[in-house]
Amino acid sequence: MPWRRTVDLVRRSQYGLPATSQAAYIASTGGVKVHYLGSEYSSRRHDLCDDYVRAIRASHLANAVEGYVDIAYNAVVCEHGTVYEGRGPHRRTGANGTAALNNKDYSVCALVAKAGGGLDTPPDAQLHGVRDAIEWLRSAGAAGDYIGGHRDGHATTCPGAPLYDWVKRGAPRPGATPPPARPVVDLSRLISAAYADPPRGGTPVSYGGVRTVEAALHGEGLLGASLVDGHFGTSTITAYRAWQKRCGYSGADADGIPGKTSLTRLGQARGFTVID
């Protein structure tokens, strides 16, 4: 199908939801997490898709344990490629697993079943729709460049193998030129750049991987955008120390200097590959 430059978007009020979500306001996010239903789901006529999205919202509102104030997702995409506004832009998702993860990224759910549960592989029209939703949240909701799966940072199989494979490839438009390869960060060069930083008395070392890591720390909400400058300075050390603590390190082990395990976890979360 052709590359759609206009989102096939159905706003909340157009399919029977209150015009504005009651979910908390959020100014921006690092990016978007992609989800699937994880249950059985059958292909259906397009005129029945909005009924299903309303049913998801009703089930979420009835979930007393989670205490949802609305449908959990910022957007839902049917097999036909239509984007249904969920909580919408500038509203904190309820779907990513924890409060911290909900603050970091928006969520987009594709109406796709678990393996063997019916429609378990997204058709091209749906992939276009998910990409449309991501770009809509970027333009209307200040979402960052990051695209991940629900399983990135949370213990789950969501969004299923076929959809997650597409996410790992950069969520390309079907038929489009494949995206560039993931950035590669050389651990030894990164450590050299960190130790050579002027506050520690060394000679500055120029290495592009520093900016890649800083951008990842920014995506995790640990480093301000103005500090993504390719300079492994005090602020970057502090941000990386916070990432190490998030990974479970403490004391001298959380020193702000990248190690293979913590850096690999950051790369998995934010889309780069680590070599040493």
Image: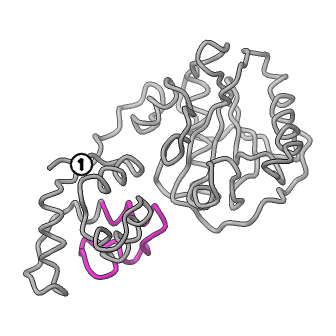
Give the residue displayed 64% in from the left and 68% down from the top. 27
Residue 165 left/right relative to 264: right
Q: Quadrant of residue 114?
A: top right
Q: Position of residue 131 (x, y in %)?
A: 55, 39
Q: Which residue is mark 1?
A: 274
Residue 82 left/right relative to 237: right
Kind of residue sitting beneath label 1: Val
**Count of all numbered marks drawn on residues in the image:** 1
Residue 164 left/right relative to 119: left
Residue 233 belongs to the span the image colors magenta: yes
Give the residue displayed 45% in from the left and 61% down from the top. 219
Residue 177 belongs to the span the image colors magenta: no
Give the residue displayed 61% in from the left and 37% down from the top. 35
200 over 275 or under it: above or below: below
Give the residue displayed 48% in from the left and 44% down from the top. 152
Q: Position of residue 172 (x, y in %)?
A: 44, 34
Which part of the image, by quadrant, shows the N terminus?
Answer: top right
Q: Position of residue 159 (x, y in %)?
A: 56, 32
From the viewer's side, name the closer residue of 140 and 105: 105
From the viewer's side, name the closer residue of 20 and 150: 150
Q: Position of residue 232 (x, y in %)?
A: 24, 74
- Identity of the residue furthest to the front in this view: 251
- What span is in magenta? 213-235
From the viewer's side, name the closer residue of 218 and 16: 218
